[in-house]
Amino acid sequence: MKISFLINNIYGIGGTNRTVINLAEALAVRHEVEIVSVFRRATATKFEISPRIAVRALVDLRSGSADAKAAGSDEPSEVVPRQEEFYAQYSKFTDARIIQDLSRTTADVVVGTRPSLNLFVARYTRDSALRVAQEHMTHLAIPSTVRAEMARVYPRLDAVTTVTEADAHSFAENTPVPGIPVIGIPNSVPRPVVEPADGSHKVIVSAGRMHRVKRYDLLIRAFGMLADEFPDWQLRIYGDGGEAAKLRALVTELGLAGRALLMGGFSPIESEWAKGSIAAVTSSAESFGMTLVEAMRCGLPVVSTDCPVGPREILRHGEDGLLVRTEDAEAVAQGLRMLMSDDRLRRDMGAAALRNSARYDPEAVAERYVELFEGAMRRRSASDRAYRTPSRTTAAVSAQPTVPPVSIAAATVDVAADDAGWLRFSAVGPQDGKHRWQFVLRHNPSDGKRLPDMPLRTTRKPLGNGGTRYTAALTPSALDDLGDGRWRVTMSSAKSANVHMKAGIRDTRRLIGAREAILAGSRPGPVGWNLPYAQPNGKLMLRTVLRQDHVESTAVDVDEHGITLTGVLCGASRIEPGALFVISRRGSHSANFTVPVRVLANNAFHAEVPVRKVVDHRLDRWEDWDWWLQPSPDNWRKIRVCHLLEDFPDVKGAFVYPAVPVVGDETSEFVSVHPAKPVRVRPYCSASGAMAMNVVDR
């Protein structure tokens, strides 16, 4: 059969987009599937979609498109209720486009994916097609006026699905639609391509949009209660949104800088789940709980608030996770403590989570939808003699569950790093044929001096679906040629120019252990580091490091008394008694101040940053001072203090330190001083990984 999904904007990021794509991919193995996006605001979709799924948009809002100023686009929608969340996006013009498409559809089944679109599907889909409404929101979170319109229009539907059984009951009780089945079918989550977490990393992971309903403030406060008890644990929160600034301020307020990290958005996310040992969900409400299932599919036990719907249908309390009271930071802390303090319990629950979450596999969920569609066809046939069921409801469209991309440019590259410095690349592309594609690293210089390309020995393996799998490995010794810099991961052939490849999975969990080994001094010799990462445009890059000596920042502590640095000198050199911490003013009026460091075990050191001295000697209202280590008092050689050796690229964004307000011992002769507003000194990590601090008198 032909199945058409009607969605608001498939080109964006969101839980509905993810689950619709997952379901569409599974159904497309045996059926013809299309995704119809009402709006298009970007050239490409954020999530990968198989080429066997047709994707089209009804309203093109990209720059220069005529649709943006079409007649009727400034008149309100006559179908979408004013109280619907996305009401402002719709207009009389969009109404006409949607109605026209639904009246002409050739699909056997049309599936709406939110209340506003379900109203269109119910009223305007041609009679030859089944009409199905997916409800991804918690039912009672839908405004009452919208629910009233649903009750009026939904009798024209053939079926309604919710993502939980509890919400199906809520729908039937609060918005009854006589004769229309309301069935709970969960969202699907594919099996991750990464290996499951092994529970060895002391990392708590959470992910989702930065919205107040997610209550990340609760999670940060709970972690703050445990920080002193578990000093070697870290909290990582992935996601973007409007709450990020408030959450960052809370991290600062609780003194958790460097321990509770806001990681920003990350896709695909499964490699980051796999770095953790515990997943945390602290929402006040969930319509389903996609992140719970994603974490479980990566082998993590989950500590989740017991929302009215969602988590309690996913987690089996005490078996694969823990349900705790909502809006209660202490209850969250107790749940985290139970797993943080018991390695065996953590691993056992992780294994159960991996096993139990298989029921959310897209193939299993797709089969439930096929049963739903076929049941609706039988009911329609019994009540409408003019209705004709599709002639082929289970004929295979593709014999393979996956199909290769249509071009190398459409392919993604997965890369895995190990703790010995190897990188392994893998991509599935179209049939190799005459092209003979090969992985090639291309230098991306900061100074215009480009190094020669580095071709990688590439293995090509034909696949049963007509594509080719390309694999290559980068050895640690390649760093001798790559040096310190950034490299594009491309593919090229004799018959084609280089193609900068899109980033897929970046599995860098082994770098967590590699960092620990380097800092412990168990790897003598030069310091090498290979970190794959994605640019904002999604292209795959490498950050390479090769240094005879390297100073890595391991902790920066900021309080009302000042700033202290703990670091490690890695490589061949040793820190000698009398070693100095050096700060250097950037710019034309350079200056250096030094303080002795306290030498620790394993070539580590501790230094008190002379903040008062820089405040007394500042020459401008804003200055930057770089941090250095002079390992020997008898040798003027300095080594820049950096924070580079991490398993993720945006150290600058994740490690955000507060400013310390300082009143100098002396009055600056060159800068106006506002007595009521002390000078603020804030350490930071630059985009290149170098440590510094800014001194601001504003």
Image (cartoon, rainbow, N blue to C red):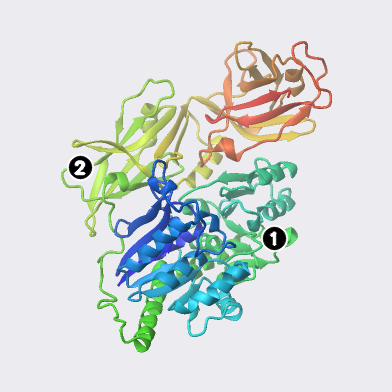
Q: Secondary structure at mark 1?
A: helix
Counting from the top left corner in percent of width and height, residue 114 is at: 50, 65
Decide: is 306 above or below 386. above
Decide: is 66 above or below 523. below
Relative to 443, 143 lies left or right: right
Decide: is 239 above or below 346. above
Q: What's the CA distance linking mark 1 and mark 2?
A: 54 Å
The amino acid at mark 1 is Val
Counting from the top left corner in percent of width and height, residue 25 is at: 36, 63
Do the residues under discs 1 and 2 have CB atoms within 8 angstroms?
Answer: no
The amino acid at mark 2 is Arg
Q: Does label 1 or label 2 sit earlier along the sequence?
A: 1
- According to the image, label 1 marks what residue? 332
Residue at figure coordinates x 67%, y 54% from the top left = 219
Relative to 79, 369 lies left or right: left
Residue at figure coordinates x 69%, y 46% from the top left = 231
Q: Secondary structure at mark 2?
A: loop
For the residue pair 93 and 235, the one nearer the viewer reads as 93
Residue at figure coordinates x 35%, y 81% from the top left = 377
Counting from the top left corner in percent of width and height, residue 338 is at: 68, 62
